[in-house]
Amino acid sequence: MPGASSRNTGTEQGRRGRNATADRALDILLIFDDDRLVLSAAHVAARLEVARSTAYRYL
């Protein structure tokens, strides 16, 4: 059925969105290490190659 495939596509896109969010959160956590316990939004933005406003939103 055509309607069924569009529902599945929406569900799959939702899963990808959640995974992308989790992946981004892990990317941020992996920036931290024993020598770098505190990070600025500017540093996070530079490491993730996003705007500083986006880094603030992530944090």
Image (tube, helix red, strand yellow):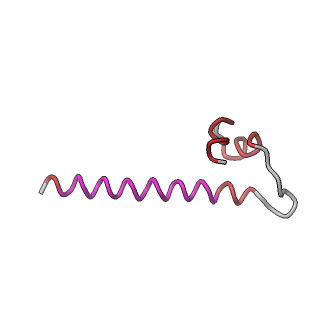
Q: Is residue 6 left or right of residue 14?
A: left
The structure residue drawn at horizontal position 62% and vertical position 39%, both measured from the top left corner, is 54
The structure residue drawn at horizontal position 55% and vertical position 59%, both measured from the top left corner, is 22
The structure residue drawn at horizontal position 67% and vertical position 41%, both measured from the top left corner, is 56
Using the rendered view, name the quadrant where residue 16 is placed: bottom left
56 versus 38 height, above or below:
above
29 versus 51 height, above or below:
below
Quadrant that contains the N terminus: bottom left
Q: Is residue 5 left or right of residue 1?
A: right
Residue found at the far left of this picture: 1
Residue 28 image point, x, y percent: 68, 54
User: What predominant SS class does the magenta segment belong to?
Assistant: helix
Q: Is residue 37 left or right of residue 7?
A: right
Q: Which residues are magenta?
A: 4-26
Residue found at the far bottom of this picture: 34
User: Magenta includes 6?
Assistant: yes
21 versus 45 height, above or below:
below
The structure residue drawn at horizontal position 85% and vertical position 64%, both measured from the top left corner, is 34
